[in-house]
Image (cartoon, helix red, strand yellow):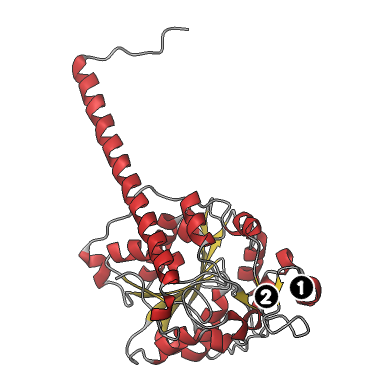
Amino acid sequence: MGNRFICMSKKDTKENGSRSKRMNRSQRKLVAEEDLLHRQALSMVLQQHQSSQRFDGSMSRRIGGSTSSRRLASDPLTNVKQGPEFLEKLTSKKFILVHGGGFGAWCWYKTIALLEEAGLLAITFDLKGSGIDLTDTNSVATLEEYSKPLIDYLQNLPEDEKVILVGHSSGGACVSYALEHFSRKISKAVFICATMVSDGQRPFDVFAEELGSAEQFMQGSKLLIHGNGNEKPPTGFMFEKEQMKGLYFNQSNTKDVALAMVSMRPIPLGPIMEKLSLTPENYGTSRRFFIQTLDDRALSPDVQEKLVRENPPEGVYKIKGSDHCPFFSKPQSLHKMLVEIAQIP
């Protein structure tokens, strides 16, 4: 075989060298910006935990300024820039981000930054007993109580204003509850590998593949927390750190995992054991979308597929290579899908 190397002129060499330097500078800039975001988020969480007594735990806090269509995406390298005409076409520019069990508002920091860069408004808050909310997790007994910050926000929303509601993991139950009680104020609902249950189902049932049946779990799980004493029913549960890393963060980078390890809190048991009452005239008229995560060990792709098959949404999207936390492992892909859903008439 002949030599496959090609001789280049000095001009070609210089041009390629300049292009390589520009690419290296661009890559270094992206890495530096991401490192800064991580440091700011970690610093914010540590500071909030240290000074949490200053905050009123009941306050919602903002961080940051049936045919189904299916989409499959891997993570692009850079954010897609949108022109002014993109914003003019949107009927709703406000995203309400609802975290999953054990998480808090802190987990959305990348999503908030990307949405705001696109000219959209992102709002999130700690649910009861989550993040820096001062409520004792063991005292949160119902889904309504757990969802109170979200309920309060929607109640105070002007009648002529609608939002896009986004729920992650067991936060999907809060989204379903909101759709039942405030459907007129929600233009679209997005479930991210979330508990998109049907009428009469419990959010816990979605995780039965990993945790076992509710009856088995309540009788003997080592994850249970008895906040009111061992002789009383359990009040919450929490995975050990190594379990958490394997289930939630198998594709997330070490910095985001470190952020989660100092921020995660126990999951109140009452809200996820509660059966939801969802009616055709309220929940049934809502526009729902589901984003599947294809490398998810907490809620397997098969379970997610079963959810959309049994309770079909308007659209289904899939993020290739994402673990249970796409806001960490695939933030750009998640952002792209949220923007695409927002643009659907």
- The residue identified by callout 2 is 204
Residue kind at label 1, given as amino acid type? Phe
Question: How far apart are labels 2 and 1 at the CA level?
Answer: 10 Å
Q: Of marks 2 and 1, which one's residue comes earlier in the chain?
A: 2
Task: Name the foreground residue: 101 vs 8.
Answer: 101
CB of mark 2 within 8 Å of CB of mark 1? yes
Look at the picture and state if 9 lies above or below 31. above
Among the 4 quarters of the image, the one containing residue 301: bottom right
Look at the picture and state if 145 lies above or below 35. below
Q: Among all residues in the image, which is located at the extreme left?
A: 11
SS at circle 1: helix
Quadrant into which the C terminus falls: bottom left
Look at the picture and state if 113 lies above or below 54. above
Residue kind at label 2, given as amino acid type? Phe
Q: Residue at the location (32% across, 77% down)?
A: 91
Query: Which numbered mark, 2 or 1, is in the foreground of this view?
Result: 1
Q: Residue at the location (35% across, 92% down)?
A: 159
Q: How many neighbours does mark 1 have within 10 angstroms: few (below 14), some (14-19), or many (20 or more)?
A: some
- The residue identified by callout 1 is 217
Q: Position of residue 215 (x, y in %)?
A: 79, 77
Task: Name the foreground residue: 261 vs 141.
Answer: 261
SS at circle 2: helix
Q: Residue at the location (54% across, 91% down)?
A: 281
Residue 340 showing in the rendered view: no
- Tell whether 314 sits left or right of 15: right
Q: Position of residue 158 (x, y in %)?
A: 33, 91
Residue 332 showing in the rendered view: yes
